[in-house]
Image (cartoon, rainbow, N blue to C red):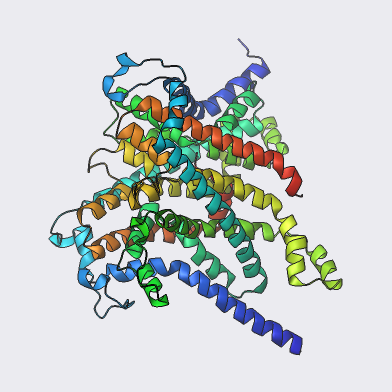
Amino acid sequence: MTYSVKRLINRILVTLLIGGFAFTMIVPFLWMISASIKLPLDVMQLPIKWIPDYFYIENYKQVWNIGGAAIRDYQFGLAYYNSVKIALINLAGSVLTSTLAGYAFAKIKFRGRTAVFFLYLATMMIPPQVTLIPKFVMFNWLGLTGTHLTLILPGLVTITGTFLMRQFFMQVPDELRESAHVDGASEIRIWAQIMVPIAKPGMASLAMIVFLWNWNNYLDALVFLNNWRLYTIPISLTNFIEESVTQYNLVMAASSSALVPVFIIFLIGQRFFVKGLMAGAVKG
Amino acid sequence: MKLSRQLKTDLTGYVFILPNIIGFLLFTLVPMVFSLIISFTDWNYTQGFGNIQWNGGVNFVEMWGDKWFTDSLINTIVFAVTVVPLTAVLALVLAVVIDRFCFARLPIRLAMFMPYISNVVAVAIVWVMMYSPWGPFTRMVQMVGVETPPQWLGDYTWALPAIIIMTIWSGLGYSVMIYTSSISSLPRDVYEAADIDGAGEVTKFFKLTVPFLSPTTFFLVITTFITSFQVFAPIQIMTRGGPGTSTHVLVYYIYTAAFNFYRMGYAASMSWILFVILFTITLVQWRGQKKWVSY
């Protein structure tokens, strides 16, 4: 009895300690949100007033240019649209190409598949910085600079995704496919009607990491996007800080706007997320 | 005409991987080969295609006398060698403690994970403000009694540590999550046997948990090494490599050499040095795992 009471007290103490640590990890976000609803002068006021006396929602209106509130239009809405567009196209594209190829690598015994797959694995070690310069030169040469295709085209195929889906299909028993073959189903029908439904959890994991990669992609966007009509959120945010560096409140409102959707998506799909992250620890 | 069975299988297979292969060839393999070729030239982008001059391996020799490069390399190594072990140790301890001794495990893990999924630019901007002379960090140090607090990002000594702290903060939750998912598959009976033998928590941690989780540690160490060597966004946003060369890292130099100075050849050779380092690290750790990773 006393032993279990002691255990319980220990547990509560440890929870408080670790919980406190976890809380300090989200303090930057709380600070950000708090600053996003303050007047510029109050942001750096000390001691920090975590909950301001007055919620200055105007900041968000200015950032999003709602009702002509902005003194200067930062085109943040457009950047948001661009980011969502690119992330969704690449999500759909890479899930499709990975599911097709992953299935073929795992189940269809075509000649040369080991060789091709080995080539894929070998290039997984190549850091993305190696291909960045050639891609820049190539896109310039093809006249694609100044379009979103520079981010979309390379994003439609991911080696990590192919690898992830192949692993997934390897676990599906062969009998399923063989019996469908006996019934006379074509390979593409087997894929679409039997395999894709089975692979949904894998596809969900892949979809989440692809979305995250694209949403947060900074280096490629910095190199390839050369005017404000094309900017995605990360680039738009950096411009924001360069142009209105003293208006911390606006910068924080913009940052908050950029972070919230990812938190929501993550909370909904965190089960798939962690699985996907195991496979896609390194972008590629 | 009737196709042979194998040929039909081959064709089906190729159709399935076709979209994938096209993307792979165009955006991975061809650029890779192209990159390797220009790394042996002194090509400046402003000169156009016609002026690609083969210069043998001069880039690969010249860079070792380039202070920007050697400083970048040293900073990158310092960065990775600090971030990787600190993250791994902290995450391991946290994951185990949360799993064994905490209530409200999920909310705690989610809170720790938030920085990882956050947009790196937004996060870097928030930290720039927190490190500013009016920000909470400076304030905290002042409260402890330091009269002239460091300038953090503006300070030659403190800029890199400041970015290291932010990086550990942002990556910690990821490692905790990965450790957590491995902890759930630890063999319970072994722990029960240890309990019967009267083993304490600390003994169990070092004698059982650490060895059991060593494959996960191995995986995490390799992946965080790779991502640490590729650090770019925080540097570009928070310090631009400064002050001086104090936070100048490899990928930042590759970026500026290529896209500010258009020295494509030189930048490409540096990107291959990055590859060689990552490849060597992975290989060495792969070899070394036999000594400390137990299955």
- The answer to whether residue A109 is left or right of residue A51 is right
Q: Nearer the viewer, residue A96 or B68?
A: B68
**Which residue is rendered at x = 40% and y = 35% of the image?**
B254
Res. A99 image quadrant: top right
Q: Is residue B279 above or below residue A1?
A: above
Between B267 and A242, the residue placed more toward the observer is B267
Q: Residue at x 28, y 78 (%)?
A: A52
Residue A250, placed above or below residue B218:
below
Q: Point out residue B232 in the picture as x, y percentages from the top left corner.
A: 41, 45
Residue plotted at (23% across, 70% down): A57
Res. B66 image quadrant: top left
Of A35 and B260, the residue lying toward us? B260
With respect to residue A277, does B110 lie above or below? below
Horizontal side of B173 relative to B218 (left or right) equals left
Instruction: Determine the residue positioned at 20% across, 68% down.
Output: A58
The one nearer the camera, A15 or B229, is B229
Q: Is residue B27 visible?
A: no
Q: Give the x, y percent position of residue B73.
A: 47, 40
* Residue farthest to the right, as pictured: B197
The spot of residue B136 in percent (x, y) is 36, 70
Q: Quadrant of the N terminus of chain B?
A: top right
Q: Where is residue B190, by image quadrant?
A: bottom right
